[in-house]
């Protein structure tokens, strides 16, 4: 029996995703986006395709694929409708945390259900008063016998309404110094007494996917749902998980920017002014050249970070650079695509206005770009310490 290479497997899966986007996503993306309706049928189809288990080891029912393939899938989905990456983005962060830091019992109990899509996960990290300052979180978990009691709230949580398993970051030791040593992460399933969705947030872009506030009022969680069953490791676990999260956000940005560029270059060859297609005007050609070059640079940064992640290296520097550059690039390219379309780029008859509205999510999500710059600078100072 001839074994297929990883490149052949990647090609098959990417082609499958590309066909799914062409056949099932593109015809309905505008309607879902306009109505801000959760695309249940598309999400269920993604579960059937195995996309909830992309990086989960095969022994637990996942595909066991590398982060390069992971990034490629996110790029292809984002070309069609970036919102579709939401339900599997933070889902894979929880899966990674369990695979990497969980006990064997936790792996057995959760990973196969995550891989099949029975469990659809989210990351309950951000709080209304904390933003990117994770160490200042106020959500608490107090041990009570064989359970922990969680109280607090989380804001801007993707999958908050439709998800049913969450990585919830809490304080288990409020007096820890430094504060991150008192942070722990729990797996909390829905439904659970005291665990409610307080509000669904109405967003500029990234529509169709629920982004909510979650409230925890005396929510009881068994001690075996503490990831790794050791207190004080939550900050490390989440930071490691966010490396993969930033790779997926960078890939989303590359996908959205590519879709915007392809729409712009096609339009430029059919729209005529002053007796010729606008693609023949030098001003438009300069825009197209800059757009394509920046997209390719962002793609290379993203896949280099994915490659190093696959090799088991620490990639907070590379993932931060990829996320920073790709997201800022996406904001620039979608604006240029709108300018090439002129007035037509500003109306909903063309998808360019959706690309433009979706772009800011990548700048803000998985840690703002201002935070990314701090992460990058600190790692560079460590690397070049004298």
Image (tube, rainbow, N blue to C red):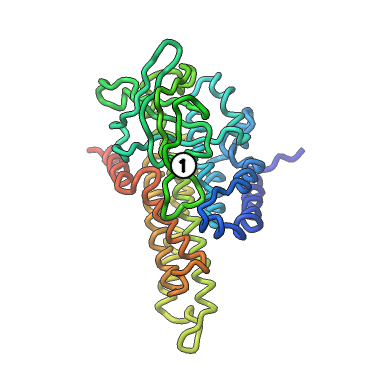
The location of residue 96, given as percent across then percent down, is: 50, 32
Which residue is disc 1 drawn over? 158
The location of residue 244, given as percent across then percent down, is: 46, 40
Q: Is residue 16 visible?
A: yes
The location of residue 201, given as percent across then percent down, is: 42, 46
Q: Nearer the viewer, residue 296 or 348?
A: 348
7 relative to 337, above or below:
above
Q: Secondary structure at mark 1?
A: strand
Q: Residues within 10 Å of mark 1 (few under 14, many from 20)?
A: many
Q: Which image quarter is the N terminus in?
A: top right
Q: Residue at x 44, y 15 (%)?
A: 147
Residue sitting farthest toward the top: 145
Q: Residue at x 58, y 49 (%)?
A: 39
Q: Nearer the viewer, residue 348 or 235?
A: 348
Residue 329 placement: quadrant: bottom left
For residue 105, side relative to residue 238 (left or right): right
Residue sitting farthest toward the left: 386
């Amino acid at each position: 029996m001839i074994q297929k290479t990883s490149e052949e497997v990647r090609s098959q899966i990417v082609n499958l995703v590309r066909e799914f986007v062409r056949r099932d996503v593109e015809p309905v993306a505008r309607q879902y986006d306009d109505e801000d309706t959760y695309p249940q049928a598309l999400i269920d189809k993604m579960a059937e395709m195995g996309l909830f288990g992309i990086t989960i080891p095969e022994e637990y029912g996942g595909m066991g694929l590398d982060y390069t393939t992971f990034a490629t899938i996110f790029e292809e989905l984002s070309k069609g409708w970036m919102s579709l990456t939401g339900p599997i983005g933070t889902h894979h962060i929880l899966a990674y945390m369990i695979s990497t830091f969980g006990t064997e019992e936790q792996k057995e109990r959760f990973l196969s259900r995550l891989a099949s899509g029975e469990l659809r996960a989210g990351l309950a990290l951000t709080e209304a008063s904390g933003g990117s300052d994770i160490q200042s979180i106020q959500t608490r978990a107090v041990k009570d016998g064989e359970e922990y009691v969680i109280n607090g709230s989380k804001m801007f949580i993707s999958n908050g309404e439709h998800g049913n398993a969450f990585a919830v970051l809490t304080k288990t030791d409020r007096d820890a110094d430094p504060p991150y040593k008192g942070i722990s992460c729990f797996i909390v399933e829905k439904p659970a007494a005291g665990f409610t969705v307080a509000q669904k947030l109405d967003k500029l872009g990234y529509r169709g996917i629920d982004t909510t506030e979650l409230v925890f009022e005396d929510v009881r969680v068994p001690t075996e749902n503490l990831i790794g069953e050791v207190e004080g490791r939550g900050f490390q676990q989440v930071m490691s998980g966010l490396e993969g999260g930033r790779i997926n956000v960078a890939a989303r940005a590359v996908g959205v920017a590519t879709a915007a560029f392809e729409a712009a270059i096609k339009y430029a060859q059919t729209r005529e002014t002053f007796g010729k297609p606008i693609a023949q005007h030098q001003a438009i050609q300069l825009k197209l050249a800059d757009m394509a070059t920046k997209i390719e640079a962002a793609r290379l940064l993203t896949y280099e970070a994915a490659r190093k992640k696959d090799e088991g290296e620490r990639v907070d520097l590379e993932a931060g650079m990829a996320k920073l550059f790709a997201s800022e690039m996406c904001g620039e390219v979608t604006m240029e695509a709108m300018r090439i379309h002129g007035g037509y780029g500003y109306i909903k008859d063309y998808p360019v206005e959706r690309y433009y509205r979706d772009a800011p999510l990548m700048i803000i999500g998985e840690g703002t770009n201002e935070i990314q710059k701090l992460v990058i600078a600190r790692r560079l100072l460590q690397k070049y310490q004298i």
